[in-house]
Image (cartoon, rainbow, N blue to C red):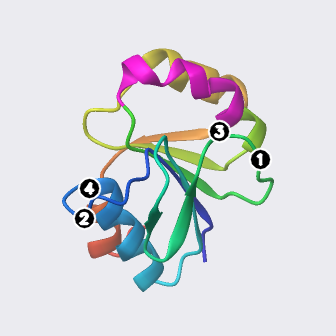
Amino acid sequence: MKKTLILGATDNPSRYANLAASRLVAHGHPIVNIGIKQGEAAGVEIEKAGEVYNDIDTVTLYVGPQNQPEYYDYIIKTKPKRIIFNPGTENEELEDLAEENGIETLHACTLVMLSTRQY
């Protein structure tokens, strides 16, 4: 199973990040929720970026490119194997930084990947 850090996690059930949390857990993937507001998604507490996890396989982005720079160091320090740029989160600067650090980048939708068994 691929431990996944959801950047932009929310407790709002109408948001894609929340749906992704639920679907990831339903598919057996452990998750870490990182967001700006307290709460929980899929039964997992939403944390602020702080503790650096060293066992993350995938970072899935639900934060727009204009708000991503403050997370660059945090993402790189987690040393994920890949970053999924969900629709609307594409960011060439972060992609370049990831590739410089040996991190695979994908323009994809986590929800579609899960539903088509490509996750």
Observer-nearest residue: 20 or 15?
15
| Residue topped by disc 4 | 16
Observer-nearest residue: 75 or 105?
75
Marks 1 and 3, how far apart at CA: 20 Å
Decide which of tag 2 and tag 3 comes sooner along the chain.
Answer: 2
Decide which of tag 1 and tag 2 comes sooner along the chain.
Answer: 2
Decide which of tag 3 and tag 4 comes sooner along the chain.
Answer: 4
The residue at 50%/15% (across/down) is: 93
Cβ atoms at labels 2 and 3 below 8 Å apart: no
Magenta-colored segment: predominant secondary structure: helix
| Residue topped by disc 1 | 51
Decide which of tag 4 and tag 1 comes sooner along the chain.
Answer: 4
31 left or right of 74 in image: left
The residue at 36%/60% (across/down) is: 11
Which of labels 3 and 4 is toward the front?
Answer: 4
The residue at 47%/79% (across/down) is: 25
| Residue topped by disc 2 | 13
| Residue topped by disc 3 | 103
Which of labels 4 and 2 is toward the front?
Answer: 2
